[in-house]
């Protein structure tokens, strides 16, 4: 069966068509600037030189999905001959709250529950719902499955997910830590044990998903016991454009002194902070280039980022009770060998050591020395495959 995996953002839509017979990606693409002048569409068929790229305004996600389906079935540049070849659609959904501890078939009831969670992540959740509705509209009768970014973290105990605010806010508003990047953390928690030589249900892992958005998770025997993102993806590490942890009183102080309202303030913390706020751009490569050219603030930004990752690893080594492995993944984690070196150098006192001969870009697997007290791994994440796997399992069980 072929599964269409869809990841809708507020003005974008990423997709992959995955053949579940061998879990290979047949086609993938990206629609950007949906609802904005100059919508851009790019589609490619893997293993071929077939592709489609154009700019044409698209008002909403339905138009974008229609364009995707046209491209997939295009007789010269498509990947399938008929939409009947698509068995189901799997959707990345930001927030499952406490309602969804695993993926779910989209029914009128589940969609209503997903909609009820909009206040916990308005922008993304609405976009995810738009993607689901667009598929329902354009492919009536085709099963849709929702895969939640928060679900894998639902095993956290209350001591990890409760904030120290009046308990009534948890009871009435469900204010708590949820965590995100769940499909990535879950994929890595499944892969890492293969390199450790222990079964997944006997492994203690610290998973470092370090990309534009970044989060760490502490995983014991395949279950998350803590993670660095919170009610929203804003908490935790320094990220491309998100501040990560700040003293909440900073908000009042800045707002009082600038006249910003809470929406502008949160927008600043989400979109104009992190690398973008401290340095030249939200992209680590730009910050690294600036640092290499002698920019002192860029060097300090990298130091702030590195130190915060180290602090979280220290905390999560406690959370898991002594890790078997620290795993680096996502854009920075997979590609930036220096970042791994910098982070791990701060753990030398624990006897954790990177092997420079193994710490080579593109080298997946163990990158620590044989005598390192904790193994260090670099693994490529895959956020689409777990969505396709869950979709297949749910559809097969219908
Ligand atoms: P992601 O969100 O997982 O796509 O990761 C994006 C981040 O990975 C950006 O900050 C990129 O600068 C960073 N990244 C990608 N390739 C490299 C690289 N070779 N060296 C350093 N950072 C990289």
Image (spheres, rainbow, N blue to C red):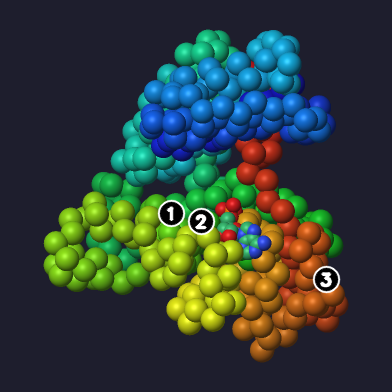
215 with respect to 368 (left or right): left
- For numbered disc 1, what is the local secondary structure? loop
Considering depth in this image, is 41 or 28 the residue closer to the camera? 41
Considering depth in this image, is 208 or 105 the residue closer to the camera? 208
- For numbered disc 3, what is the local secondary structure? loop
Q: Which residue is mark 2?
A: 213
Q: Nearer the viewer, mark 3 or mark 1?
A: 3
**Mark 3 or 2 closer to N-term?**
2
Occupied quadrant, residue 120: top left
Q: Which residue is mark 1?
A: 233
Q: Would you say the beta carbon of the disc 2 residue lies within 8 angstroms of ligand 1?
A: yes
Considering depth in this image, is 388 or 203 the residue closer to the camera? 388
87 with respect to 313 (left or right): right
Considering depth in this image, is 321 or 247 the residue closer to the camera? 247
**Mark 2 or 1 closer to N-term?**
2
Label 3: how many Cα within 10 Å (few below 14, some 14–19, many 20+)? some
Name the image quarter holding the N terminus: top right
| x and y percentages locating residue 180 in the rendered image | 50, 51
Q: Residue at x 72, y 81 (%)?
A: 352
Q: Which residue is mark 3?
A: 358
Q: Residue at x 35, y 37 (%)?
A: 118
* Residue 238 in view of the camera: yes
Q: Gap between marks 3 and 2, in whole Å?
A: 26 Å
């Amino acid at each position: 069966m072929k599964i269409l995996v869809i990841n809708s953002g507020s003005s974008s839509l990423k997709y992959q068509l995955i053949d579940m017979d061998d879990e290979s990606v047949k086609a993938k693409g990206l629609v950007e600037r949906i609802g904005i002048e100059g919508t851009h569409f790019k589609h490619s068929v893997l293993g071929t030189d077939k592709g489609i790229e154009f700019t044409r305004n698209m008002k909403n996600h339905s138009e974008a999905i229609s364009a995707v389906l046209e491209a997939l079935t295009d007789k010269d540049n498509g990947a399938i001959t008929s939409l009947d070849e698509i068995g189901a659609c799997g959707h990345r959904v930001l927030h499952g709250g406490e309602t969804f501890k695993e993926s779910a078939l989209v029914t009128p009831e589940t969609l209503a529950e997903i909609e009820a969670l909009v206040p916990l992540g308005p922008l993304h959740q609405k976009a995810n719902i738009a993607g689901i509705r667009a598929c329902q509209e354009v492919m009536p009768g085709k099963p849709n499955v929702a895969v939640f970014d928060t679900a894998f973290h639902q095993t956290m105990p209350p001591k990890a997910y409760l904030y120290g605010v009046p308990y009534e806010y948890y009871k009435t508003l469900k204010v708590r830590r949820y965590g995100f990047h769940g499909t990535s953390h879950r994929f890595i928690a499944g892969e890492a044990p293969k390199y450790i030589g222990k079964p997944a249900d006997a492994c203690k892992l610290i998973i470092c998903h370090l990309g534009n958005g970044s989060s760490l998770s502490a995983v014991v025997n395949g279950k998350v016991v803590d993670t660095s993102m919170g009610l929203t993806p804003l908490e935790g590490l320094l990220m491309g454009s998100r501040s990560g942890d700040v003293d909440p009183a900073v908000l009042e102080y800045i707002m009082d002194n600038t006249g910003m309202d809470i929406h502008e303030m949160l927008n600043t913390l989400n979109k104009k902070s992190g690398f973008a706020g401290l340095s030249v751009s939200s992209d680590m490569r730009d910050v690294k280039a600036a640092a290499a050219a002698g920019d002192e603030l860029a060097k300090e930004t990298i130091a702030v980022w590195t130190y915060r990752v180290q602090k979280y690893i220290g905390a999560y080594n406690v959370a898991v009770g002594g890790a078997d492995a620290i795993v680096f993944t996502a854009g920075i984690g997979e590609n930036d060998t220096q970042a791994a070196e910098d982070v791990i150098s701060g753990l030398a006192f624990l006897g954790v050591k990177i092997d420079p001969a193994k710490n080579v870009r593109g080298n997946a697997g163990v990158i620590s020395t044989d005598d390192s007290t904790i193994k260090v791994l670099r693994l490529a994440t895959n956020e689409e495959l777990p969505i396709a796997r869950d979709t297949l399992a749910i559809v097969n069980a219908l």
